[in-house]
Image (cartoon, helix red, strand yellow):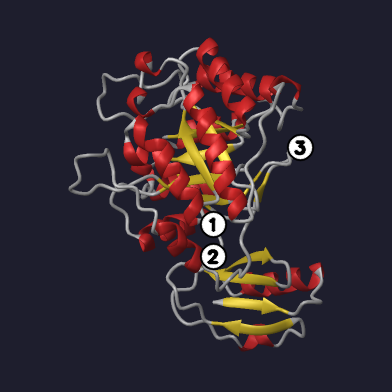
Amino acid sequence: MLVVLKANASESDVKAVCQKIESLGLRAHAIPGAQRTAIGITGNRGEVEPGAIEAFECVQEVIRVSKPYKLVSRELKEENTVVRFPDSDAAIGGKEVAVIAGPCGVETREQAFAAAERVAKAGARFFRGGAFKPRTSPYAFQGLGELGLQILAEVRENFGLLIVTEAVDHETLALVDQYADVIQIGARNMQNFSLLKRAGKASKPVLLKRGMSATLEEFLMAAEYIMSEGNYNVILCERGVRTFADHTRNTLDLSVVPAVQRLSHLPIIVDPSHGTGKRNKVTPLSRAAVAVGADGLIIEVHCDPDRALSDGNQSLYPDQFDSLMVEVRQIAHVLGRSVADPVTNPGARRPAGAAAD
């Protein structure tokens, strides 16, 4: 159920309605919008009698939400959600197409710094790099753990890049929440509902990757798990699904971008690196993702991908990433959007966010 307040509703009005909802044993989720505040109601096991809520003078209408996902839905919030970050003008979901770039995994400080310098110069505002790596083989490189997070914090301090990195369980999520700017939930954990609920209690935005065989509704319901716990800063990510195709690692489903944008207010970005698994396909699919309306890209870049400890085959060389940025910048301009300009001296950027204690 959705409670729509009048445009002139005050903060005390919102608080009073939320208190009434919670007195009925339900949970209230106030989502401010440009023109109105909407309050989503969750926790009901059956029909909610709207009379007691409609009695408030500040309430414009009470709507029964038809979708199984409520907080994610455009029925709750008509305008697009823009995820913003303290002490930075970077955002995900606005007019600027966000670019997240860096190696699959943090291997050494020198490797991370070399990649960070190049992607920052090219115009990326976010740095990706795994400190915890869920791998198919137990013998493959699993990441540096907290040391990797400490290196990522140094990257932020030195290059002003916002940090995006994956949490794989409750313990690592607590550490990632401490060090990073965005908590990534990987495809393998899209339906790890316990982890999603824990991410919903975190203080940082969450980047949720689509599961390997997840339907659109399952994808949105996974985001609903996070939002139902009170974290409304969720970024969706299409990273390819498993099909019969053998010419590519996964099948990148770009049709999901406009489908999500029709049903949900959340931003959606695209991962052409995991979506294809092939270096020569990353740039063409990046161009296509921007053209179809994606709010951002997450791209693997490594200064020596032939020696990378994970996913070297899909990692771009820095020069290739430079060219990609030029091309997607041109496509974004045609659509009335932008991609951040190259930076001559990324070390001069103000650090985005505080380093971990």
Picture coordinates of residue 78, whole percent (x, y): 61, 70
The residue located at (76%, 22%) in the rendering is 348
Q: Please name the amino acid that badge 3 sits on.
A: Asp
Viewer-side residue, 252 vs 80: 252
Q: Earlier in the sequence, mark 3 or mark 1?
A: 3
Say above or below: 144 vs 49.
above
Picture coordinates of residue 301, whole percent (x, y): 47, 26
Q: Which residue is mark 1?
A: 227
**The C terminus, quarter of image:** top right
Viewer-side residue, 91 vs 207: 91
Label placed on residue 87? 3
Cα separation between marks 2 and 1: 7 Å
Q: For marks 3 and 2, give the one nearer the viewer.
A: 3
Picture coordinates of residue 157, whole percent (x, y): 69, 22
Say above or below: 214 vs 314.
below
Picture coordinates of residue 177, whole percent (x, y): 58, 35
Q: Earlier in the sequence, mark 2 or mark 1?
A: 2
Q: Around disc 2, counting alpha carbons within 10 Å, would you say few (fewer than 14), some (14 to 19), or many (20 or more)? A: many
Q: Are marks 2 and 1 in contact (CB under 8 Å)?
A: yes
Viewer-side residue, 232 vs 260: 260
Q: Indicate the secondary structure of the residue bearing disc 1.
A: helix
Q: Which residue is mark 2?
A: 71
